[in-house]
Every structure is written in structure tokens, then in C-alpha cells.
Image (spheres, grey):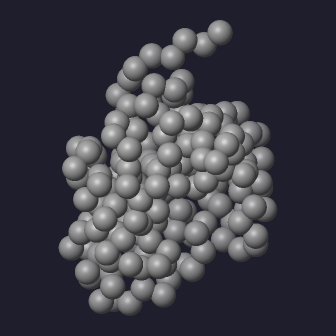
Amino acid sequence: MKIYQPKTLKSSFVIVCPDNSLSLLKNTANSIKSKFDLPFICVANGDATQEDLAEMKLVCPAYKGKTTISSLINVGMRHAPAEWAFIVFAGSNLPQKIDGKFAFFVNDEKDILFPVVQRKINFIDGTWNGLYLNKKTFREIGEFQESGELLEVKCEWAERALEKGCRFKAIIGSKVC
């Protein structure tokens, strides 16, 4: 039986902005600033204008992906400002101390954690919002496919992760909404 212990990991947040909404970005940025002393960035979708990006850069470092959720996550993980990254969607309000709660269940960099939402306890059916993973491990697994059905994209990536020895962990009581 594995005994988990509290630990501090170098964590950050990647705010995914599929709608390029400045107000939703600000909402999540304020949630992070008020509860954590951790760095964060955002990733706008490929339809973002230079003006959109300029406004987003007033909130935090901003990057531009393509038009798919998987593309935004890929760009975010390439630029994540710390060793570990939470993927959160713009407009989300983060629960207090989620960083400590997730870190508690991390054994090593091969752990991939996600919150249990609506009793979905497997990665494929689970939410992307609140996904917590190691930047080095993400590079080792490879990026998400940027085309195809989202379910298929998650399945294919999860298969590669399992082949690399990764473990998926569903964390109860850590919903990001």
C-alpha cells in the first residue's frame, strides 16, 4: 500500500481560452492571483487577433494556438512556466489549495492527475479542466493530436502515456468550475 505525503511541487497554470474571451480570462486570472502565488499563462485560439493577444498580454503572458482544444493544451504545455502545470479553462474558479491537494497524490513525474466531475473517474471520460501533469512527461509522451474527435484524441494520448509508464489518478473533491 502506498502512503502519500504532503509535498511542494513547482506548479503553474495554463489558462486555455477557446473563445478568446478577455472577461473569462480575467475571471480565472483573478481566481489564481487571490488564492495562489504561482505563475500562469494563457493560450488563445487561432482566431485571436493581434488586438486580442495584446489585451490578454496585459493580464498574463499570452500565446496563440490553433482552433482545437488539443492545440491550445499543446501550446500551453510547451510554454508552461513551471515543472508541473494545471490546465484550466478561462472562466473557471479554482478551489483553494488545489495545488497542495494534487501534489499530495503525486509519487513522481509519471503521475497524471485530474478531478472527478459528475462521477467520471477515468481519464477518457473525465474533464480536461483541472488536468495536472508534468512538463517533462508531457514532452516524453508527445503532444495531443490536433485533429479528430476529442474522445479519440484522449484515447490515443492516454495509450501513449500508459506505454511510457504513466499513471492516471482521479482526485475527488477537486472540481474546477
Q: Residue at x 50, y 74 (%)?
A: 18
Residue 77 vertical position relative to residue 160 in the rendered view, above or below: below
Q: Considering depth in this image, is 155 or 100 the residue closer to the camera? A: 100
> What is the quadrant of residue 20 in the picture?
bottom left
- Seen from the viewer's position, the closer of residues 50 and 90 is 90
Q: Residue at x 54, y 78 (%)?
A: 66
- Position in image of residue 51 (x %, y %): 30, 89
Q: Please report the residue visible at 54 percent of the width from the left and 48 percent of the height from the top.
A: 131
Question: Which residue is rendered at x = 34% and y = 36% of the image?
Answer: 97
Q: Is residue 10 visible?
A: no
Q: Position of residue 24 (x, y in %)?
A: 36, 71
**Count of marks, rendered view:** 0
Examine the rendered structure and indicate whether residue 78 appears above or below residue 25: above
The picture places residue 154, in percent across and down from the top left corner, at: 71, 56
Where residue 27 appears, as percent x and y from the top left, is: 31, 65
Q: Residue furthest front?
A: 118
Vertical comparison of 118 with 49: above or below: above
Q: Quadrant of the N terminus?
A: top right
**Image: 65 above or below 127:** below
**Residue 151 visible in the current orientation:** yes
Viewer-proximal residue among 68 and 166: 68
Find residue 142 and report its image quarter. Answer: bottom right
